[in-house]
Image (spheres, rainbow, N blue to C red):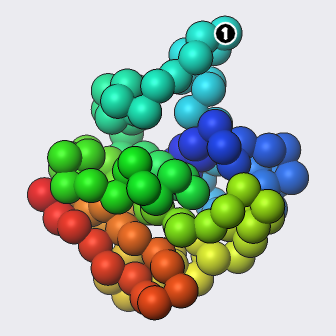
Amino acid sequence: MIVLDDQISYDVIIAKIAAWYPGAVVSIRESRPHSRILDPEVPTLLRKYRQPTFVTINHRDFFNHRFSHESYCIICFRLEQLEAVHVPDLLRLVLGLPEYRTKSRRMGKVISCTRAGIIDLAV
């Protein structure tokens, strides 16, 4: 399951990811409809799902070892809001890498994707 942060939960982005990703693609908003979700609440909400991969462009707040947990993965793209349309293609590239191709390899990692490269923090 791919769970998208509020900032990138647009129908067009969800549809582009769903076109190639075999599992569910949802917005974090679906975990608690009709309420505002603050960043510190995201890990608790992610643990309600089975092995989700959370995708965000909020690199500054989420690329942090304190967010790592064995039951989910966080992928942080360092992109501006206007660049969010590139998330589906970039996510596909990241998930195609051998070290992130399967859920079992991703779980427990907080992954940073920047123009300089990809690094991860593990539990």
Determine the secondary structure under disc 1.
loop
Image quadrant in which the C terminus is located: bottom left
Q: In this view, does 99 lie to the left or right of 86?
A: left
The structure residue drawn at horizontal position 58% and vertical position 83%, both measured from the top left corner, is: 93
The structure residue drawn at horizontal position 67% and vertical position 62%, both measured from the top left corner, is: 80
Task: Return the residue nearer the eye: 2 or 40.
Answer: 40
Position of residue 42 measured from the top left corner of the image (x, y, whole percent): 40, 32
The structure residue drawn at horizontal position 38% and vertical position 50%, both measured from the top left corner, is: 62
- The image quadrant of residue 7 is top right
Q: In this view, does 33 lie above or below 114?
A: above
- Residue furthest to the top: 34
- Residue furthest to the left: 123
Q: Is residue 98 left or right of residue 19?
A: left
Position of residue 110 measured from the top left corner of the image (x, y, whole percent): 31, 61
- Residue furthest to the right: 12
What residue did someone put label 1 on?
34
Q: Would residue 101 be visible to someone looking at this image?
A: no
The structure residue drawn at horizontal position 80% and vertical position 44%, both measured from the top left corner, is: 10
Position of residue 25 measured from the top left corner of the image (x, y, whole percent): 64, 47
Q: Is residue 16 above or below residue 91?
A: above
Q: Would residue 79 be visible to someone looking at this image?
A: yes
Q: Residues within 10 Å of mark 1 (few under 14, many from 20)?
A: few
Q: In this view, does 96 lie above or below 77?
A: below
Position of residue 27 measured from the top left corner of the image (x, y, whole percent): 64, 37
Number of numbered discs overlaid on the protein picture: 1
The amino acid type, in three-letter code, at marker 1 is: His
